[in-house]
């Protein structure tokens, strides 16, 4: 069995932005000549989700509306209350409000950090309407996504 790793980097521009990374995943499979196996797509960020779903503007807009109602960004979150929060305070390090993102962490907890997709006969086994997305759950940021293929 062969194992290959690759990291892609990009910058997001806004909250709940869907970044289509499907072609990067397919190219990674082709470049490494994997015929059968699986590819893991993983976000090392606690505010960037990896999901497979339909690429359709109506869906992405409905999803944004749904998540904003389910986990409102303007609600009170203990994570954002610096009078009680004492852990992982990046805002102390950079002098801004980057750590005031309780809604982002709650959303990520529901959505997840990775997808694992089979590769069969050299093809990524996505359904006809499926795409691979990195979804920004915070604000504009530099992001990394790690891909790992295992197969022959």
Image: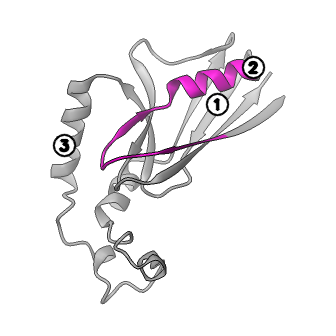
**x and y percent of residue 27 in the render?**
64, 22
Res 100 → quadrant: bottom left
Dot placed on the residue nearer the N-terminal end, 2 or 3: 2
Give the class, few, some or many, for how many residues have Cα within 10 Å of label 1's Cα (few <14, many ≥20). many
Residue sitting at x 51%, y 56%? 45
Quick check: 134 above or below 29? Answer: below
Q: Residues within 10 Å of mark 3 (few under 14, many from 20)?
A: few
Position above or below: 13 against 20: below
For this rendering, which residue is in front, 24 or 113? 24
Per the image, the residue denoted by label 3 is 66
The number of numbered discs placed on residues in the rendered structure image is 3
Residue at mark 2 to residue at mark 3: CA–CA distance = 38 Å
Location of residue 122 in the rendering, given as x and y in whole percent from the top left corner: 68, 13
Residue at the image point whose x is 24% and y is 37% from the top:
63
Q: The N terminus appears in which quarter of the rendering?
A: top right
Which residue position holds label 2?
Answer: 34
Residue located beneath label 1 in the image = 39
């Amino acid at each position: 069995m062969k194992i290959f790793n690759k990291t892609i980097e990009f910058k997001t521009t806004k909250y709940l932005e869907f970044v289509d990374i499907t072609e990067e995943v397919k190219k990674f499979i082709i470049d490494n000549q994997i015929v059968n196996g699986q590819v893991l797509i993983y976000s090392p960020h606690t505010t960037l989700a990896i999901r497979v779903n339909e690429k359709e503007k109506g869906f992405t807009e409905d999803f944004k509306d749904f998540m904003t109602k389910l986990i409102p960004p303007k609600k009170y979150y203990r994570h954002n209350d610096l009078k009680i929060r004492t852990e992982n305070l990046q805002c102390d390090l950079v002098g801004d409000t980057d750590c005031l993102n309780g809604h982002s962490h709650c959303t990520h907890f529901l959505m997840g950090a990775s997808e694992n997709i089979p590769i069969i006969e050299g093809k990524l086994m996505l359904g006809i309407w499926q795409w691979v997305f990195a979804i920004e759950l915070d604000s504009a940021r530099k992001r990394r996504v790690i891909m790992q293929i295992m197969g022959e």
